[in-house]
Amino acid sequence: MTADLATYNFAYLDEQTKRMIRRAILKAIAIPGYQVPFASREMPMPYGWGTGGVQVTASIIGRQDVLKVIDQGADDTTNAVSIRAFFQKVADVAVTTHTKDATIIQTRHRIPEQKLTEDQVLVYQVPIPEPLRFLEPRETETRKMHALEEYGLMHVKLYEDIAQNGRISKTYAYPVKVDGRYVMDPSPTPKFDNPKMHMSDALQLFGAGREKRIYAVPPHTEVVSLDFEDYPFEIQTFEQDCALCGAHGVYLDEVVLDDRGGRMFVCSDTDHCEDRREHGHVGAMLAPNQEAAE
Amino acid sequence: MSTDTQAFTGGFSDPVFQSQSVFRKLMDGMARPGSIHTVEHDAGQPDPLGAAAGAIALTLCDHDTPVWLSAGFAKSAVGEWIGFHSGATITREKAEARFAFAEPGVTPSSFGLFSLGTQEYPDRSTTLVIEVAGLSEGQSFTLSGPGILQSKTVEIAGLPEAFLRLWADNRPLFPRGVDVILTAGRSFLCLPRTTKIVA
């Protein structure tokens, strides 16, 4: 135990708060896709920085856990680095950037490319948990709509997309139906990741700190992206392969290289990309440097 | 030991980490209905409360969660023990209870008297912790539903006869309904309201 650990309870939250969140998590798992209200606490970081995910992680984490934190797929961006450092300080847990080594993965807006296992828990940071919120601002009404399974408004929204744009234009936070009952916001993950939620081997927990909601998708549970028979759900596809590791069929980020239109597409999942490069995969923009080095 | 002193004995020796350990098993159990988990830490619960049930009580109950006890537990030191260690109040009203603990062989006449939650807030329902004779052998049941890949067979000894009927009434209420944790000594398995059970 490090000396500064004693100033906080293990994992920062007090035990009563953890019990309250743990009870909410158990009910969330029992009612897949339903948003359980919880008494979200002030955390030592601003709302919008993942306070919901942090509270969920703090309530489930133990000494033996290995934590990975990603922000838009990357292990090395501000949000991921600071949350990882937070748990190292307040819980003294082991951390990793390798997806396969982690027991808890807290994520902001991506699902790792590598298939998750039964021994892993994926914790999402959620800004706005209510998928109907932009269609109906009143909580009393959206709650009633969930209670009555009245999701016509959502289908109207998707239909209007098609009428105006010729396709469903929503590319992230694409609404899903969980176990044939609740319509759920998968958090602002790209719709590319929606199929990974379906029948996942890992438990998926969602925490929204400012909005004070926790919800869950148990393993092996149907998660279906909403669509129409004549306009089926489709994920993004990329013409290029990753410029660094040559990966195909993964989610890519566009990186602008100069002011003359130069750009590259690289894996959004940094661990996946590094792992592939370690195993000798080389992308188009990395290859010339290697030859030069040799 | 008299009933009075039994209430003050026991409790987790390391509450932070032992309750975390029990919770993770509970979370895994709820996420994978029918999976058997074993509580490693003894909460020093008084008879006739089982070790798993005692650990679950101290892990989840506090002053926010009224607890209902079946008749056998109610006349023992269990109520005072839970009250002393967790701060939970013991209620005789099933509908008020967030958690209910039942001793072996007790058949609730109906789950409907417990809180089933509302259509708007289905999470406000009672979690029943029911002690059975054993979870390793006995009558076999087939479980299916979220958290279960295709189906899972479990063997339960001493499940109250009316349980399947009560569960069959509970399942169609979804999203409302009670969730059940079956305990046997140190072992437990979870049956969230989504699970279908076939004998």
Image (tube, rainbow, N blue to C red):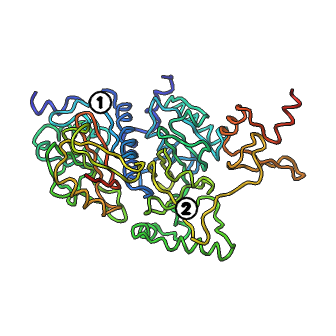
On what subunit does the disc labeled 1 rest?
A: B
Q: Is residue B193 visible?
A: yes
Tag 1: residue type? Phe
Q: Position of residue A155 (x, y in %)?
A: 54, 72
Do tag 1 and tag 2 residues touch (Cβ < 8 Å)?
no
Callout 1 crowding tier (Cα within 10 Å): few <14, some 14–19, many ≥20: some
Disc 1 element:
loop
What separation in Å lies between label 1 and label 2 (alpha carbons)? 44 Å
Q: Position of residue B107 (x, y in %)?
A: 15, 51
Q: Is residue A162 left or right of residue A266?
A: left
Residue at image point 33% right, 36% down:
B37
Q: Position of residue A240 (x, y in %)?
A: 77, 50
Residue at image point 48% right, 63% down:
A183
User: Would you name the residue on which mark 2 appears?
Assistant: A225
Q: Is residue A214 visible?
A: no
Q: Is residue B16 left or right of residue A142?
A: left
Residue at image point 42% right, 55% down:
A32
Question: Relative to A168, is A43 above or below?
Answer: above
The nearer-to-camera label among 1 and 2 is 2
Disc 2 element:
strand
The one nearer the camera, A121 or B169, is B169
Residue at image point 87% right, 48% down:
A258
Q: Quadrant of the N terminus of chain B?
A: top left
On what subunit does the disc labeled 2 rest?
A: A
User: Would you name the residue on which mark 1 appears?
Assistant: B12
